[in-house]
Image: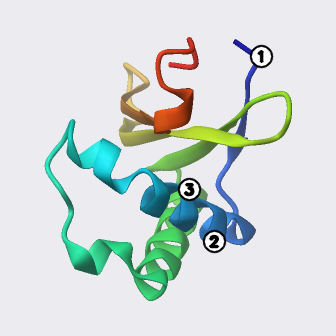
Amino acid sequence: MSEVSIHLLMGENCDEIFQFEVENRKFFESIIPGRGEWYYTKENFKEITQEIIEEQELGIRYMYIIRNNDGDMVGRINLFSVDRGIFQKAELGYRIGQKYNRRGYA
């Protein structure tokens, strides 16, 4: 396994994340329920990306891209239900692409 780095989602990542989701759709849907056709449109991903960026600015949700040493996107991490109260907690979700699965990235 390569070392990894994580990078906060930015607007310019929209196309890359869209491609990642499309390429891994069958793999992800074999593990978790599908999201429907509407999810896999570029226009929808532009809206999702903008919404997440706005939520990052508010400190309530974050998305990070996981990259290997070659700079390839191997997955993504989401922090949601962020609670800035006394416990400073959040829920974590992640996806690792099929060709990087079982290589220690998660």
Q: Check disc 3 and give the amino acid type.
A: Gln
Q: Residues within 10 Å of mark 1 (few under 14, many from 20)?
A: few
Could you say which is closer to the camera, residue 19 or residue 62?
A: 19
Question: Front-most of 93 and 86?
Answer: 93
In the rendering, which numbered label is found on residue 3?
A: 1
Which secondary structure, mark 3? helix
Q: Which residue is mark 3?
A: 56
Measured as percent of width and height from the top left, residue 40 is found at 36, 73
Which label belongs to residue 15? 2
Pick the front one: 63 or 65: 65
Q: Secondary structure at mark 1?
A: loop
Image spot of residue 24 (x, y percent): 42, 50
Of labels 1 and 3, the one closer to you? 1
Which amino acid type corresponds to the residue marked 1 in the rendered image?
Answer: Glu
Residue type at the position of mark 2: Asp
Residue shown at 52%/80% (left/top)? 46
